[in-house]
Structure formats: structure tokens, C-alpha cells
Image (cartoon, helix red, strand yellow):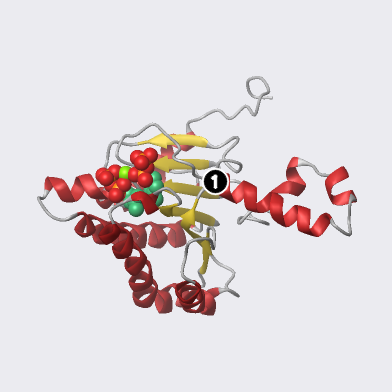
Amino acid sequence: MNYKKLIPRLDLERLPAHVGIIMDGNGRWAARKRRPRMYGHRAGARSVRQMVELGVELKLGYITFYAFSTENWGRPEEEVQGLLKLLKEFLAKEIAELNRQNIRVNIIGSESRLDPAYLAEIREMASPTFGNTGLTVNMAFNYGGRLEIVEGIQKLFAESRDKPELIEKLSPQAFSNYLYTAGQPDPDLIIRTSGESRISNFLLWQMAYAEIYITQTLWPDFDKAAFIEALIDFQSRERRYGGVESQ
Ligand code: IPE
Ligand code: IPE
Ligand code: MG
């Protein structure tokens, strides 16, 4: 299906401000082709590129890609090393074009466990885009929702040593500014590919009122048309935020 044919079915005034994507199914996609898991991850990187292109075309504000979770360290060493390398290769290959398109690339996640030299290198690679004002692409790498909240609490406590009112006057909204996504709108839509109905420690705090869309499609097969289908589905939802119908 040519994705362009689907665009007229979208209300461009009511697009989600922020879309979070749990990119799952790379391993199963590779297994179906009798190829190693890394083959699936590399194919998955091409899907990321497609989603970013569509994000720019539709003028979306924020997309967060879940690329490596704090639990993914438990995978075989070869796969872990492959995924670390793939992020670097992706940035090396794409950053100039992303920058040209005015995209801001943020790497969000914990610094724990990552080699400081590696961390410095990927930050440096993304840094030319930091002043950009178009689509923000968050690459959630070494990301865990629970760890993000814990690190947020640690930051807050450190700051509160000479400002106790930060704790006394803390609100959910104020706490959001201690998360990796500080200053960004919460995701309105979370997409998970490959059929699993779980959150797997993604954006736990931020997704309080997100709409969740699960598709059987494996991540490397998730294309622009599939993304638009998810957006159309999102637009059919009635969001009530705890209120009653069409308040
Ligand atoms: C998602 O694909 C990518 C990462 C978690 C890095 P998987 O590698 O989880 O693929 P499946 O779930 O084994 O098919
Ligand atoms: C979630 O996928 C993490 C990423 C997409 C990076 P997983 O494949 O790691 O999640 P589980 O193990 O199925 O919950
Ligand atoms: Mg998986």
C-alpha cells in the first residue's frame, strides 16, 4: 500500500504531539529468514529511518524510539555488543541528513553501565543536531522507566539540599522535569510492534494517559503505511482522562 494514499484519512490538526515506539520483533523477523538476530536489528534500523522521514513529512513534534532497555544487558554478549555498535553506525550514517532536516537527536537513558568513552562518542555524534528546532527524535538507549524515576529522585534530592521547598512543593508536573524527557510533552500514543501486550519498562511515568496501539507486524516490516494506520486508529479513540464522554 502506498502510504501517500492513506494521508488524506488523517486529520493533520489532531496528530499526537509525541509518539513512543517499542520496536519489537527484530529477532523473530530474522529467525523467519533463518538469519542471525543482528540481521533483524540492522533491518530494524531501516524502519527507524522510515518513521523519521514520515515524522518530518507530517510535522510531528516528538518520536521516542526504544532501542535498548536496561534489561537488554541480559542478552548474549555478542548481541549486546552488536546493538551498541549499531547505534553508533546508525548515527554515523544518518546524522548529517537528520541535521539537514532540522531534526534534534536526543539520546535518553541512564549513563550507568555504559563505557564513558562510548557515551562521550555517541553524544558527540548527535551534538550537531542539539540546536535544531524541527522533529525531536529521542533514542532511548540503556533506558528503563524505573531507573529513570530513581535517577530523577536522586537529582531532585541533590538539588533540594539547599532548596527544601523543591520537596515540599513537589507536584507530578514539577517532577516531570527531573526525567530524561524534561520539557517535552508526554506521549499521546505508544506503538508496540510484534504483538506483545506489555510495556517492558518503557516511559512508565510519561505514558500515564497514552493511547496504546499494538500491532502483530514485526518491527523491520513496520513501514510508513503501518505508522499511518496507527495514527488513524489513534484518532478514532475517545480520550477521557478520567472524565466523562465528550466533556
Ligand atoms: C527488539 O527486537 C529490539 C531490541 C529489544 C533491541 P527483539 O530483539 O526483542 O526481537 P524479538 O522480540 O526477539 O523478536
Ligand atoms: C523491549 O523489547 C525493549 C526494546 C524494544 C528496546 P524486549 O524484547 O526487550 O521486551 P520483552 O523482553 O519482550 O518484554
Ligand atoms: Mg523482543
Pick whichever, 66 or 209, lies toward us.
66
Horizontal side, residue 205 vs residue 144: left or right: right
Q: Can residue 6 be seen in this snapshot? A: no
Task: Give the residue drawn at x 57%, y 73%.
Answer: 132
Task: Give the residue drawn at x 79%, y 42%.
Answer: 171
Q: Can residue 214 be seen in this snapshot? A: yes
Task: Give the residue drawn at x 20%, y 59%.
Answer: 39
Report x, y in % for residue 146.
56, 44
Report x, y in % for residue 17.
57, 49
Pick whichever, 30 or 189, lies toward us.
30
Q: Amino acid at mark 1?
A: Gly
User: Which corner quadrant of the image does residue 131 belong to?
Assistant: bottom right
Q: Which residue is the extreme one toward the left? A: 34
Relative to 244, say whether 202 is above or below. below
Q: Quadrant of the C terminus?
A: top right
Report x, y in % for residue 22.
41, 46
Please tell me whether mark 1 sits on a helix, a strand or a loop.
Answer: helix
Relative to 208, say whether 88 is above or below. below
Horizontal side, residue 203 vs residue 214: left or right: right
Q: Is mark 1 within 8 Å of ligand 2?
A: no
Pick whichever, 38 or 78, lies toward us.
78
Q: Quadrant of ligand 3?
A: top left
- According to the picture, the residue beneath numbered tag 1 turns out to be 145
Crowd tier of the residue under label 1, counting other residues whose Cα lies within 10 Å: few below 14, some 14–19, many 20 or above? many
Report x, y in % for residue 228.
38, 46
Horizontal side, residue 186 vs residue 163: left or right: left
Task: Give the residue drawn at x 33%, y 69%.
Answer: 85
Label tally: 1
